C-alpha cells in the first residue's frame, strides 16, 4: 500500500532566528497539514496507540473528527480523557508512547499524533470555541489537592467532572507547577498553560496560591478540616547538587533556580521584570535530560556566546527527547559526552571561572539498565566558563513527609503509593506524580493523577 | 491581595507595615519569614515576620528600601495591597529557658532579632539587648527592645547616639560581667561574623539568622544555599537560623554580592562599617 502523504512536518522557526527570541519553536500545523496527516491514520479497530497513552486518549476517534474537519469536536473528544491537550501535544514524548505503537510506524513513520493533538487544542482555543462539559450533580464531597502541576491538575479536573468540590493548594504564586516554573516559553508558551488551567477552573476547581502545605497547613489539618480526601502531587521539588568543591561559587545554579528565574519570574524580560539572571559568556550545563536541554537553550536565548552540555554518559544514554536534542544541536549547542565535572574554580570574588572535568568510560549496566559511567584516571582537563547550570535531577521536597506523621516514604524520600490506586499508607490520602516516582514526564504524572482520581472517586462514592 | 492596614516610617528608608495575611498570622512563630511580591513584575523577596495578630489576621513587617521591589513596597500607602504573601516559611526559633540571653541587632537586622528576643523573654529568659547602626537615624525599634530586655545597649559607628563603636564592643563588656547562655545575632554579615568570632573565644553558643538571596523560599531552587559545618544547607528550609560558629560567612558575603552589578538591591543590608574592620 502506497501512502498518499508522508508524515507531515510542523513548520518551525529557523535556528538562526529562534535563538534570538523566546517564542515557540514550531508554528504548529495548518488546517491543510492537519488534514493530510490525519488521512494517514488507519483507524485501527484495536488501536495500539491508545494503549501507549498513560491517560488513554481516544486517539483514532479524535483523528477521525480531524479528517471530517471537525477540529473543535476533536479537541473535545480528547478532553474526555485529558484536560490538558495543548500542553500534552507539545511536551509529551509521543515517540516513546502512542506513536511508538502506531501500526503505520512499522511500515513508515507513525502518525504524528502529538502534532494533531496540539493542532486541535490550539484550534479550539484560538477560535474561542472552548465548551465546558456538563459536570455531574454535586456530590457534596470535598477533595484537597496539593500542587497544581500536571498530576494535581489532572486529579482536580477529573474529580470536578464527577461533581466533587476540589481545592488545589499551590505553594508558588502562579498555578501550573513545572509547566510554569520549569518548561521554557519557547517549548510551552505560558498563555497556553494559563488557558488550560482556566479550563480546569471552569470545571469548578478552586485554586489557592501561596499556600505551602506543610507550613501554612498540614495534610492532617486538611483531613481534620473540611476535606474528605487529600491528593499529594507536590512534584520533585529539591534540586540535586554534585557535592563537589566550588559548587557554591557565584554563577553556579541548580536548573530549578535558573529556569525558575527565567520562566516563572520572567528574568528573560529583565529589566521590565525585576528578577535578574546572568546573560552572555560561556555557559556549561551539566546533565543529559530534558531539563538540561531546556537550560542550555534558555542560556543561548539569554545571549550566551557558547553553551556546552557536559554529560557523563554517551549520546545513546541521554534521557532527553530526541526532538529536544535535535533542536539543541541545530541551535549550536555543543555536546561533550563522557565527561563529568569534579571541581569548580572561582576568583577572589567567589565568581566561577573554570570547571575541572574528568573523562569517563562506560562500564557495566547499573540499576537503570544504562551503562554505568566510570572515571578514567589522569584524564582531568579544565574548561573556562562564566555560568554553570546543574541539571542532574531532583530529590523529593521533604516538607510534606516531615509534617505528616505515618506517611510512608521509600529510602529516597519519595511517598509510597499504590500503582493501581495512588493510595498512601494513610487513610484518605493519595499521592502521584514526581513526588512518588522521582523525576518523570508530564504525561506520566497525569496518568498517575487519573488513576488516583478514579480511586478517590470510588472511595468517596462507596463511603457515601 | 494583601491590604496594607498601616504604614509608618521608622527611620530613613525603613518602614513598619501592618498588612492583612490571616493564613500566615494564624500559623506564624518567632523566627519565621514570608516571601512577598508587591506586583506582577516584582521579585519574590523574603522578609522576617516582625509581629502578628491572629485575631485581626494581620502580620507586621519591617521593610528597608534597598532596591526596586522594596522601593515598590515602600511606595504603597495604607489601603493599597501587595499581590502575594507566602508563608510562614523557615523553621521557628528553638526557644527554651536557658538563663541570660544576649540579643544583638545590627541595622535593620534588629527587626529580625526583636521577635526572637520577645519569644525568649516570654519563655522566662533574661534578655540583654544590643542594637547598633552606623548612625543615630538608623537606630530602630529602641522602645520595643527596651520593653522586653532587662538592659539595652546602643552603639553607633559615629558616636551620634549611645556608645561610639561596634556592637561587639558592648557585647564584650556584657560577656565579661554576666554569664551568657546564648547569643543571638542578626545584622549585616560582617557584624554577625565579628560577633561569632568574639563568642567563639568565650565558648558561648551563638545563633545567627541569615538573609541570603532566595527565589521560591520552599526548598525548590537552592539559591539560598550556605555552607554550615562544611555542609551545604538551604537557608529557606534548613534555617534561617544556624549555629553561627559553623557558618561560612565569607562564602555568604560573596553569594550576596552575586548580582550586585545587575541589581544592587539583592544585598539585604546597607553598607556596614565593620566590613572594613574584619
Image (cartoon, coloured by chain):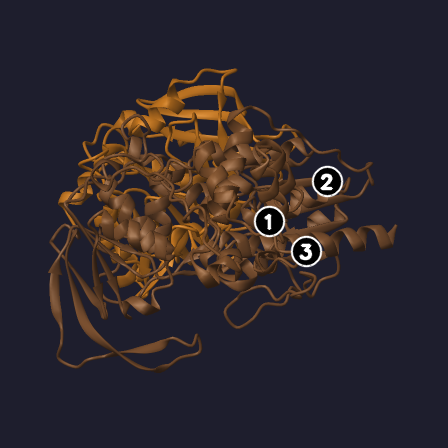
Chain colours: A brown, B orange
Q: Chain of mark 3?
A: A
Q: Label 2 to label 3, Cα distance in Å?
A: 14 Å
Image mark for residue A412: none
**First of labels 3, 1 by sequence position:** 1
2 or 3: mark nearer the eye: 2
Q: Is disc 2 in the same subunit as disc 3?
A: yes
Residue A128 lies, with reference to residue A357, above or below; the image says above
Find numbered disc 2 in the image and state the secondary structure of the residue it sits on: helix
Q: Nearer the viewer, mark 2 or mark 1?
A: 1
Residue A267 against residue A331 in the figure, above or below: above
For image coordinates 81% across by 51% down, the residue present is A460
Q: Does the CB distance between marks 2 and 3 fall below 8 Å?
A: no
Where residue A429 sits: x, y (%)?
A: 70, 57
Asked whether, in this view, residue A395 is left or right of residue A213, the answer is left
Mark closer to the observer (3, 1):
1
Q: Which residue is mark 1?
A: A59
Whole-percent x and y of residue A381? 11, 69
Label 3 sits on residue: A452
A120 sits left or right of A320 in the view = right
Give the residue number, with chain letter if any, for mark 2: A161
- Would you identify the image quadrant in which residue A241 lies? bottom left
Q: Secondary structure at mark 3?
A: helix
**In-front residue for pair B244/A204:** A204
For mark 1, give the secondary structure. Answer: helix
Horizontal and vertical percent position of residue B137: 28, 24
Say which label, 2 or 3, has the lower sequence index: 2
Horizontal side of B22 relative to A175 (left or right) equals: right
Question: Does residue B59 appear in the picture of this structure?
Answer: no
Amino acid at each position: 500500500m502506497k501512502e498518499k502523504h508522508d508524515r507531515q512536518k510542523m513548520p518551525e522557526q529557523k535556528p538562526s532566528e529562534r535563538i534570538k527570541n523566546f517564542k515557540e519553536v514550531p508554528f504548529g500545523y495548518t488546517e491543510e497539514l492537519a488534514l493530510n496527516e490525519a488521512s494517514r491514520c488507519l483507524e485501527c479497530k484495536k488501536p495500539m496507540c491508545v494503549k501507549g497513552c498513560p491517560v488513554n486518549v481516544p486517539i483514532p476517534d479524535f483523528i477521525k473528527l480531524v479528517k471530517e474537519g471537525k477540529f473543535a469536536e476533536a479537541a473535545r473528544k480528547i478532553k474526555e480523557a485529558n484536560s490538558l491537550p495543548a500542553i500534552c501535544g507539545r511536551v509529551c514524548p509521543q515517540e516513546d508512547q502512542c506513536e511508538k505503537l502506531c501500526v503505520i510506524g512499522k511500515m513508515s513513520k507513525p502518525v504524528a499524533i502529538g502534532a494533531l493533538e496540539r493542532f486541535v487544542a490550539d484550534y479550539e482555543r484560538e477560535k474561542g470555541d472552548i465548551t465546558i462539559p456538563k459536570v455531574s450533580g454535586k456530590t457534596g464531597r470535598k477533595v484537597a489537592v496539593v500542587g497544581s502541576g500536571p498530576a494535581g491538575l489532572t486529579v482536580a479536573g477529573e474529580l470536578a467532572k464527577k461533581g466533587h468540590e476540589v481545592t488545589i493548594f499551590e505553594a508558588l504564586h502562579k498555578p501550573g507547577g513545572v509547566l510554569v516554573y520549569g518548561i521554557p516559553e519557547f517549548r510551552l508558551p505560558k498563555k497556553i498553560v494559563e488557558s488550560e488551567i482556566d479550563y480546569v477552573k471552569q470545571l469548578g476547581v478552586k485554586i489557592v496560591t501561596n499556600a505551602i502545605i506543610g507550613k501554612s497547613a498540614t495534610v492532617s489539618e486538611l483531613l481534620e478540616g473540611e476535606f474528605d480526601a487529600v491528593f499529594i502531587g507536590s512534584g520533585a521539588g529539591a534540586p540535586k547538587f554534585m557535592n563537589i568543591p566550588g559548587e557554591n561559587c557565584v554563577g553556579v545554579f541548580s536548573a530549578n533556580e535558573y529556569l525558575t528565574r527565567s520562566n516563572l519570574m520572567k528574568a528573560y524580560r529583565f529589566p521590565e521584570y525585576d528578577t535578574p539572571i546572568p546573560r552572555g559568556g560561556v555557559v556549561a550545563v551539566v546533565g543529559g535530560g530534558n531539563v538540561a536541554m531546556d537550560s542550555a537553550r534558555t542560556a543561548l536565548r539569554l545571549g550566551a556566546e557558547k553553551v556546552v552540555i557536559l554529560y557523563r554518559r554517551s549520546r545513546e544514554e541521554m534521557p532527553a527527547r530526541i526532538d529536544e536534542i535535535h533542536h539543541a544541536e541545530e541551535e549550536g549547542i555543543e555536546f561533550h559526552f563522557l565527561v563529568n565535572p569534579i571541581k569548580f574554580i572561582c576568583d577572589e570574588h567567589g565568581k566561577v571561572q573554570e570547571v575541572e572535568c574528568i573523562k569517563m568510560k562506560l562500564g557495566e549496566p547499573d540499576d537503570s539498565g544504562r551503562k554505568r559511567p566510570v572515571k578514567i584516571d589522569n584524564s582531568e582537563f579544565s574548561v573556562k566558563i562564566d555560568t554553570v547550570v546543574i541539571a542532574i535531577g531532583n530529590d523529593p521536597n521533604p516538607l510534606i513527609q516531615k509534617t505528616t506523621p505515618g506517611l510512608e516514604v521509600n529510602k529516597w524520600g519519595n511517598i509510597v503509593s499504590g500503582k493501581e490506586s495512588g493510595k498512601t499508607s494513610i487513610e484518605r490520602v493519595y499521592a502521584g506524580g514526581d513526588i512518588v516516582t522521582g523525576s518523570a514526564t508530564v504525561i506520566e504524572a497525569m496518568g498517575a493523577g487519573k488513576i488516583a482520581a478514579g480511586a478517590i472517586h470510588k472511595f468517596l462514592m462507596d463511603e457515601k | 491581595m494583601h491590604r496594607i492596614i498601616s504604614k509608618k516610617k521608622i527611620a530613613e528608608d525603613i518602614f513598619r507595615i501592618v498588612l492583612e495575611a490571616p493564613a500566615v498570622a494564624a500559623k506564624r512563630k518567632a523566627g519565621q519569614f514570608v516571601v512577598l511580591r508587591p506586583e506582577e513584575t516584582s521579585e519574590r523577596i523574603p522578609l522576617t515576620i516582625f509581629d502578628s495578630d491572629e485575631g485581626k489576621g494581620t502580620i507586621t513587617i519591617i521593610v528597608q528600601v534597598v532596591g526596586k521591589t522594596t522601593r515598590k513596597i515602600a511606595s504603597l500607602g495604607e489601603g493599597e495591597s501587595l499581590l502575594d504573601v507566602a508563608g510562614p516559611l523557615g523553621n521557628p526559633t528553638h526557644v527554651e529557658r536557658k538563663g541570660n540571653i544576649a540579643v544583638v541587632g545590627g541595622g535593620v537586622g534588629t527587626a529580625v532579632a526583636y521577635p526572637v528576643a520577645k519569644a525568649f523573654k516570654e519563655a522566662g529568659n533574661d534578655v540583654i539587648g544590643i542594637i547598633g547602626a552606623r548612625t543615630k537615624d538608623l537606630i530602630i525599634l529602641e522602645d520595643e527592645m527596651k520593653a522586653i530586655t532587662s538592659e539595652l545597649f546602643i552603639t553607633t559607628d559615629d558616636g551620634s547616639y549611645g556608645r561610639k563603636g561596634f556592637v561587639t564592643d558592648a557585647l564584650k563588656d556584657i560577656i565579661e560581667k554576666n554569664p551568657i547562655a546564648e547569643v543571638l545575632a542578626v545584622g549585616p554579615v560582617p557584624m554577625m561574623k565579628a560577633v561569632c568570632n568574639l563568642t567563639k573565644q568565650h565558648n558561648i553558643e551563638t545563633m545567627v539568622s541569615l538573609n541570603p538571596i532566595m527565589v521560591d523560599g520552599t526548598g525548590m531552587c537552592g539559591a539560598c544555599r550556605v555552607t554550615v559545618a562544611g555542609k551545604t544547607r538551604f537557608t529557606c528550609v534548613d534555617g534561617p537560623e544556624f549555629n553561627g560558629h559553623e557558618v561560612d560567612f565569607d562564602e555568604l558575603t560573596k553569594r550576596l554580592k552575586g548580582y550586585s552589578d545587575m541589581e544592587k538591591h539583592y544585598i539585604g543590608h546597607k553598607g556596614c562599617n565593620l566590613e572594613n574592620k574584619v
